[in-house]
Image (cartoon, grey):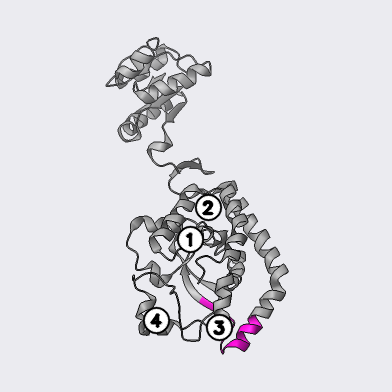
Amino acid sequence: MIVGTGARAVRLAGVLSRRGTTIVGAIDDSPQPALLHDCPDIPWLGGMDRLIDETVRRHVDQLYVAMPLRSGFDVWLRTQAAAQRLGVPATLEFDLGEIDARAHLVLDRNGTAALKCNQHPSQQGLQALLKRALDLAVSAMALAVLSPLLIVIGLWIRIDSPGPAIFRQDRVGLSRRRFQMFKFRTMAIGAEAMVADLPTIDPHGVMFKAEADPRVTRLGAWLRRTSLDELPQLINVLKGEMSLVGPRPMPVWVYDKVTVPDFHRRSSVKPGMTGLWQVTGRQQDLERMSARDLEYVDRWSLSVDVQVLLKTPAAVIGGEGAR
């Protein structure tokens, strides 16, 4: 027996009929024409006050509630209470799409259920395991193969200008958590303190790379053009703070200046060493970069990650937008 007579009840009746289930009737305090018109062989049996009597009289062995969550939850509570008294199974049928496209039910060992919404698919279940496995395998292999190159670049930086070879900076990662991102140092020591003296570096208030930045060392300029300065981030990937593919991790001071709510959706996935923005020109424009990042978040799949990884070498060699 179905509790409800609207469009959801019609869809449910079709599913049950295809399974060979016999539907004895429908219960609804406010019967709607949908079920009665589309399924005339399913009779309306009355309101909720008839639920127990009709369930017993018609030997019902399964109750289905097919109503919108907002208006039907009280009906569900009444139905499951009646079903418990009668010892009849009851099922609440609803469309997760009316809550969110990324909603799913989780059952725990204690028999309780939770409705989770908005968790990005790359952060749950088998897909999360596969993405992490790809990150671990590629980053570990790359670090092993490239270790001689990393050592040479590190020594070259130390010879080229005073200061450490590795630069660490607080960035915004998954769920807006801060982490220290590693890069080969491409600027003179104290470069961050010089921003106030270089107003042309940040003409729009949020972008953070200039056409000709006097703080960048000679070697640093070459490392940036070739993107070799990004290689130490393989350590961040190995640690789980970043992924191979994802939105670029924003500096904290840039992130704090953005007031557009949708922008924060980029933090629903791990930041990446490469992404759609990097393989489509790397325009130094926050709006365009954000659009690419959100496109990645909304379109994400493992195949998209693989496609971005395959396109990255050509983007690096081309050097378009690299600064």
Q: CA distance from mark 2 to mark 3?
A: 40 Å
Q: Is residue 54 above or below residue 149?
A: above
Instruction: Looking at the image, tell me whether mark 3 or mark 1 is earlier in sequence order.
Output: 1
Q: Earlier in the sequence, mark 3 or mark 4?
A: 4
Q: Position of residue 118 (x, y in %)?
A: 43, 48
Q: Amino acid at mark 2?
A: Gln
Q: Which residue is mark 2?
A: 123
| Residue corresponding to mark 4 | 195
Query: Which numbered mark, 3 or 4, is in the foreground of this view?
Result: 3
Dot 4 alpha-carbon crowd within 10 angstroms: few under 14, some 14 to 19, many 20 or more? some
Secondary-structure class at tag 2: helix
Disc 1 versus disc 4: nearer the observer: 4
Instruction: Using residue 296 as the reference point, say whether residue 152 is left or right of it.
Output: right
Q: Is residue 297 above or below residue 155?
A: above
Label 1 vs 4, first from the N-terminus: 1
Distance from Cα at disc 2 to Cα at disc 4: 36 Å
Disc 2, disc 3: CB below 8 Å? no
Judge whether residue 165 is colored magenta. Answer: yes
Local crowd size for mark 3, using a 10 Å CA cut-off: few (<14), some (14–19), many (≥20): some
Provide the residue designation for mark 3. Answer: 218
CB contact under 8 Å: marks 3 and 4: no
Whichever of callouts 2 and 3 sits on the residue coming sooner in the sequence is 2
Q: Report the magenta residues as a range.
A: 154-168
Query: Which circle marks residue 122 in the picture?
Result: none
Mark 2 is surrounded, within 10 Å at the Cα level, by few (under 14), some (14 to 19) or many (20 or more) other residues, namely some
Measured Cα–Cα span from mark 1 to mark 4: 27 Å
Label 2 vs 4, first from the N-terminus = 2
Which residue position is annotated with label 1? 174
State the image quarter where residue 140 is shown: bottom right
